[in-house]
Amino acid sequence: MGALKIRPVSNTDCRLLWEWVNEPQVRAFAFRSEAVSWEEHLDWFHKKLADPDCSIFILTDESGVSMGQVRFDMESEKSTEIAVSISTEQRGCGYGTEAIRLACEQLRRQRPITEVIAYIKPDNLPSIRAFQKAGFADRGKKIVRGQEAVWMTWKVSEVMEIILAALREVKEQMGKKGTFEISPQTRLYGRGSDLDSLGLVQLVIEVEERVGARYGVPITLTDEKALSQENSPFRTVESLTDYVTGFLLEGEASRVS
Ligand SMILES: CC(C)(COP(=O)(O)OP(=O)(O)OC[C@H]1O[C@@H](n2cnc3c(N)ncnc32)[C@H](O)[C@@H]1OP(=O)(O)O)[C@@H](O)C(=O)NCCC(=O)NCCS
């Protein structure tokens, strides 16, 4: 699979999205199965483009050929519902999974979401599988628009939220030097890192303070254990999240035992 990209939808995608939405399998697995007329689509499309609670992304290959779409409709400030489709001839090659992953990450950079929800018809096995592979967890069944649906969610952990908030603070303090993007993949330490050593020290202090205040347990991120780990916990936001989560869980286990 070549490098895939996502871009925001634009006015010129209107017809393509209409063709995709009326593709038989897309209609069959939608909660409303009737075909969508051009007039209805035009009206819907322009409303969605102007709606601040809706984000639509187009998945493209390296050369910019459109391969699918992902739409998010915000349910609240932190929670959003996702819908996805891949063009018929491209299905079954992993693109759906990648579209879901890339779009969730992109949305998270733009909004403070903590939860993405997918409702899928129970017989839509490729979709259930694609969401599973993209890291969604099965939450059971729900009735959606009068029909049974598999309910799946992707959650941003609270610890990661804390680390991302701390990083936002550090980035602000860095002023003009803080030009990096904030995401789970932001590199904190080592070659190609986005933080300088002062930034890293500031981040460590911020995270220690915020985690200590939230969980009521003192945490030292620069102790021997963290520094002696073969794979430093400071590589990325994601690895630091894993380390802090492990620390909190270990503490919980020792309090219980
Ligand atoms: C759902 C959809 C977006 C998935 O995209 P995709 O590019 O085909 O997804 P992927 O290739 O990443 O993953 C599909 C997985 O389902 C599996 N799959 C395909 N058909 C299957 C079937 N009949 N039974 C079980 N698994 C199946 C594939 O093997 C693959 O899993 P694997 O990698 O473990 O082998 C795409 O099929 C689509 O556009 N469908 C129509 C619209 C739709 O249903 N949208 C979702 C509404 S919730």
Image: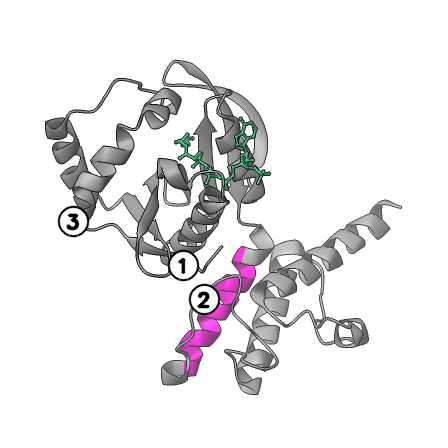
Q: Residue at x 71, y 66 (%)?
A: 219
Q: Which residue is drawn at 26% across and 17% down?
A: 34
Q: In this view, does 101 lie to the left or right of 232?
A: left
Q: Is mark 2 on a helix, strand or loop?
A: loop
Q: Are discs 2 and 1 less than 8 Å apart at CB?
A: yes
- Crowd band around label 3 with a 10 angstrom C-alpha radius: few (<14), some (14–19), many (20+): few
Q: Is residue 191 visible?
A: yes
The residue labelled by disc 3 is: 12
Q: What element carries label 3?
A: helix
Q: Which callout, 2 or 3, points at the residue further toward the start of the chain? A: 3
Q: Which residue is drawn at 51% across and 24% down?
A: 150
Q: Where is residue 39 in the image (x, y as percent from the top left)?
A: 10, 28
Give residue 182's mark.
2
Give the CA distance from mark 2 to mark 3. 30 Å
**In the rendered structure, which amino acid carries the disc numbered 2?**
Ile
Q: Can residue 75 be seen in this view?
A: no
Q: Which of marks 1 and 3 is in front?
A: 3
**In the rendered structure, which amino acid carries the disc numbered 1?**
Arg
The magenta-colored residue range is 161-174
Give the CA distance from mark 2 to mark 1. 7 Å
Q: Position of residue 208 (x, y in %)?
A: 64, 68
- Crowd band around label 2 with a 10 angstrom C-alpha radius: few (<14), some (14–19), many (20+): some
**In the rendered structure, which amino acid carries the disc numbered 3?**
Thr
| Extreme residue in the front direction | 89
> Magenta segment: does it hold 164?
yes
The residue labelled by disc 1 is: 109
Q: Position of residue 27 (x, y in %)?
A: 32, 23
Q: Where is residue 221 in the image (x, y as percent from the top left)?
A: 70, 71
**On the image, which quarter does residue 160 sit in?**
bottom right
Q: Nearer the viewer, residue 218 or 9?
A: 9
Q: Nearer the viewer, residue 53 or 6?
A: 6
